[in-house]
Amino acid sequence: MQLPVTARPDFHITRASHVVLQVADLDASREFYTQVLGLVVTAQEDDVLYLRGIEEACHHSLVLRKAPAPSCARIGLRMFSEDDLEASLAFFSAHGCEAKWVDVAHQGKTLHVTDPVGVPLEFCARMPVEPRMITRFAEHRGGRAQRIDHYQIVTPHVPKALEAYTAMGFGLSEYIATARDELRGVFLQRKGNPHDIVFFHGPGPRLHHFAYFTPEGQDLLRACDVAGALGFGRGVERGPGRHGPGHAMFVYFRDPDGHRVELFNTHYQVMDIENEPVRWDPADTNVSFPWGLPAQRRWFEETTAFEGVETTMSDPPPAPLTLERYLAELP
Amino acid sequence: MQLPVTARPDFHITRASHVVLQVADLDASREFYTQVLGLVVTAQEDDVLYLRGIEEACHHSLVLRKAPAPSCARIGLRMFSEDDLEASLAFFSAHGCEAKWVDVAHQGKTLHVTDPVGVPLEFCARMPVEPRMITRFAEHRGGRAQRIDHYQIVTPHVPKALEAYTAMGFGLSEYIATARDELRGVFLQRKGNPHDIVFFHGPGPRLHHFAYFTPEGQDLLRACDVAGALGFGRGVERGPGRHGPGHAMFVYFRDPDGHRVELFNTHYQVMDIENEPVRWDPADTNVSFPWGLPAQRRWFEETTAFEGVETTMSDPPPAPLTLERYLAELP
Amino acid sequence: MQLPVTARPDFHITRASHVVLQVADLDASREFYTQVLGLVVTAQEDDVLYLRGIEEACHHSLVLRKAPAPSCARIGLRMFSEDDLEASLAFFSAHGCEAKWVDVAHQGKTLHVTDPVGVPLEFCARMPVEPRMITRFAEHRGGRAQRIDHYQIVTPHVPKALEAYTAMGFGLSEYIATARDELRGVFLQRKGNPHDIVFFHGPGPRLHHFAYFTPEGQDLLRACDVAGALGFGRGVERGPGRHGPGHAMFVYFRDPDGHRVELFNTHYQVMDIENEPVRWDPADTNVSFPWGLPAQRRWFEETTAFEGVETTMSDPPPAPLTLERYLAELP
Amino acid sequence: MQLPVTARPDFHITRASHVVLQVADLDASREFYTQVLGLVVTAQEDDVLYLRGIEEACHHSLVLRKAPAPSCARIGLRMFSEDDLEASLAFFSAHGCEAKWVDVAHQGKTLHVTDPVGVPLEFCARMPVEPRMITRFAEHRGGRAQRIDHYQIVTPHVPKALEAYTAMGFGLSEYIATARDELRGVFLQRKGNPHDIVFFHGPGPRLHHFAYFTPEGQDLLRACDVAGALGFGRGVERGPGRHGPGHAMFVYFRDPDGHRVELFNTHYQVMDIENEPVRWDPADTNVSFPWGLPAQRRWFEETTAFEGVETTMSDPPPAPLTLERYLAELP
């Protein structure tokens, strides 16, 4: 199987940066994200709420806009400098990606780009600086989410996404491919750990989840306990459990609008040239779940639409081992 | 609803003590209990393996005997002194419970009693002293199980069990009763926390599980991770999760023979006269699961027979909210 | 060395119950105990503040009274029933201990007793019931102190205290004695773990510290971090560290008035007749500190006076290995 | 105060890579590093032991060589590719740094460089790949050290080190400077968190410590407990505690030869252009210790010599607040 090689383009994307979601009720979302996940509020202006993780010095990593129907407006990526933004225009033009300058509150120069598989991206290089809350221990809540880490996107065009993102300088850390070399999932990274953006095969482009990092298993457990205490207990959709690929301990929540957010703990550093991408076989159930139960069917199937972006169906892969099937097939 | 009052009989039962299981393969069981649960081996003699928790100074809290078919031979309770054992004979005789002196290796004077609902009990007051391993940190493994805590028994005669055990001096800490005052479960304790023995309604008498205490949530997570790493990952049957009744964080494992063992963390102290038993309503799903997913049907239905004891069917209660039903009814 | 044997008196003391302290500034104390230790406020009435641990169903385990000078008014012990209180009068009379009935707010019948070494005790059997906060996870703060566990008293009369408390039914779990059989410390317990009350040799009677239990090492670390964040960081007097005797992980704080409070995690169960008291040698430095640094001299020497009780000097024991001496003697 | 600006040189250093120590007894060191820190052995060849953290896929991050006297032979840094190594030669030549190609076992092309303040560096871009042990949970020991993170060097020439390393592309994340703008310490990083190499003012160049990352506070506590259980307890020199600068929870050990190694948990991500270096004032004691006790004098003063490199004295800064002084000045 021939995998594309990471390029060194003329611009430097540094990391996953922020996600912009449409939600029905800002108060409900605010309670969920501050009490259960443990994010802190930077600002609430009219119908927009800006949140960040407890270690983040940037103005926002999660933007919630009040809107009649839930969707994801955009996912954000950082470039190192505004010169990098300028330098990227030629690249996007050469790759047929629509790109335009926009004004976005609380961000420096910002570029909107639709990536080759239709995902609405937002690049910027600067945000206003806010105090890191990491040592304000008396104010930490719930899961103590520290910083945004990555997105997972569903698309029927995984190989195309892989090609485009390696051209943008992303490294492939892990991937999931069948015995017949069909790519099912790719983990792509810029910041030196397993992923900034992940693409999985399915009807899309749609957002499967976004993820915040928190360092300790206890934080995952406390987030669940607080969720239970505050009436969000049914929103603990999957976990706490252990990932096969990536090796992290995780828990997935559905927020009050059904958006899926993962809280997960540390994973490994990947920044050495000799590290080959790790291949996983989807037929190996340890890929999905080293212990405990597999995910519910809804975890595989329910995703968030991107605002104004149509979903393209995909050839369904062989059915995954869902929790429903697992239970039905128990001896 | 009239609950029986705890008596002060002439003998003092102090705590849940040990469980005797029949298993098919001592080597497989030894690996599971020492590596995943973290028990330590006191001795292996012929076809019997004696284990204890890392803080236990007694010779054994788990006895595994090689046998062709899995079952539970007996569950053990401690009395404070051998005088208490003598003093209890009159009580058991008055209650029509068969009781006889037996010789049991590595125990002092031992009394076999069949309780009023048919559970084969074993009372003793002394065991040989072994070193507590609690500060031998370099030797701790997996879940670091510290000490045996309680048993859960299934029986069609919960009220009868409640009556008998309160007569033996047990306190009722929590119970589960329908709106029509049908008792579904009772938590009975001697040692000052929620339970030494629990009875739930169902076909029995059968052993639902026995439980080891470990103080930290991290120990539960590590036990799961070690289970996954050593090929016992599918045996993580339920959890990690949070109990409604009792409030503990838990994880349930099925051992290589299918016996169910719970590892759970701390719960509250209950030793004050003003503490009324806590009542739970089985129709309230928070009783089963404050957050996450309910238990699989097999968790409710699969239990271990007591050796040579017939199972009596029960009127089934209204079906519990199993994981299967929960998933089927999701919107 | 002849140790006294635990008696079975006609009354049942069940556990350490509550401590009554005099403090200068209720607001400062309230912030410290609720934010750093994590206690919850039951009530504040005039110049008295009542607090309890997050699992406690009793009205109070810590009572703070505004007063011009810091001291400890009394330490409280529970008896099982008010009949036990009545039954104890004869005992105290026979042992020459002053005992009198008093009215105390938010307690049932209450008996004030001066013990044989001069400690002002307060016995009761009932308090009003308050909700356990143990599952109100969103409201937990700092060290999540769960329940009061024990007191440590300094007295020049350790053997006399041992004699008196074993006569009251306490079991001796551990003790510290020199090679010449001089008793330096005794751990006495009623509730089935290592201690409800501890006596150490020194000028007294004075209160060395009182201790709250919390199950996880992370809670100790978080209490320290919150202390640092809120300006109580210099009050982290010793630890986090590991005890030799008792084996618990601990941290000692000085509260705003200089009272010493320990937060510590689980220790072992001790309720079997074959468990002999564990003897420790004060000349073995592992007794003081299995790892890290020994305690400061002030930890050994600074204690809280009991209100209106004179301190009797003691023959000083050979100087303990203090932090000051340890540092001075380093190669 | 004028701080140098990070350059973008023609070569890419990626991270702290490995440290080479001389030790007296390989067996003692092996026990300490594998049982207490939790490193895994890649190979032992004649008188050289190669170790790595549990997540590391590279052949070694710690090399121990048997030698008559303890010292540090070299500290290693990674470049991204061997082309980067070639490209760096011009830079080192221009900066008057001696650089030469050497053959080093289990490393690709390797360059020895003496940095402008005299530190013997070793650059390489490749090592043989070893399996990551991060999910081999049953084999994890002690502190579960995951990966090497940074070095701390003592030098009388901090400004010169800062100048040289920013020219090499390092970013300055935090620094410590007096009110009179005397630089006392600089945190320099390439991998996107606070430090790969730190320089503090003092007689040097000498190695103060090297540090392994481990994600959870419990791992620090377990490392201490294992140290105590295995006879390394007096080697717990400082902590567990919380850093002011960098914000990490830490514990410092002295290994059997007196080399100092830090185990510490996560710290924040720093990769955005708007993040200004954080300045700390050494006169603010929160810089040294947000809670608990300051470090012993020996922590400030005892360091490891680089093999064959002479130590240059420095003007001593105003005496830091050592534990000895703190204790002497307590009221």
Image (tube, coloured by chain):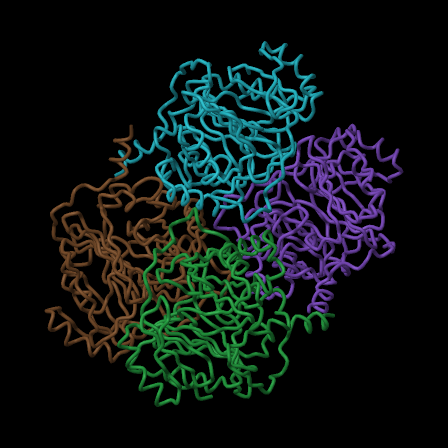
Chain colours: A cyan, B brown, C green, D purple
Q: Find the residue positioned furthest to the front.
A: C46
Among the 4 quarters of the image, the one containing residue D269: top right
Image quadrant for the C terminus of chain C? bottom right
Task: Return the residue nearer the eye: C223 or B76.
Answer: C223
Side (left or right) of C23 relative to D329: left
Up-down: is D59 above or below D301?
above
Among the 4 quarters of the image, the one containing residue A276: top right
Residue A174 seen: no
Residue drawn at x 31%, y 68% is: C126
Side (left or right) of B134 relative to D205: left
Up-down: is A288 above or below A225?
above
Among the 4 quarters of the image, the one containing residue C178: bottom right
Side (left or right) of B148 relative to D288: left
Residue A188 image offset from top left, x and y in percent: 56, 27
Residue B242 image offset from top left, x and y in percent: 36, 48
Residue drawn at x 29%, y 77% is: C84
Q: How many marks?
A: 0
Residue drawn at x 78%, y 47% is: D177
Residue D121 seen: yes
Residue C301 image offset from top left, x and y in percent: 61, 76
Residue D283 image offset from top left, x and y in percent: 75, 54
Up-down: is B221 above or below C2?
above
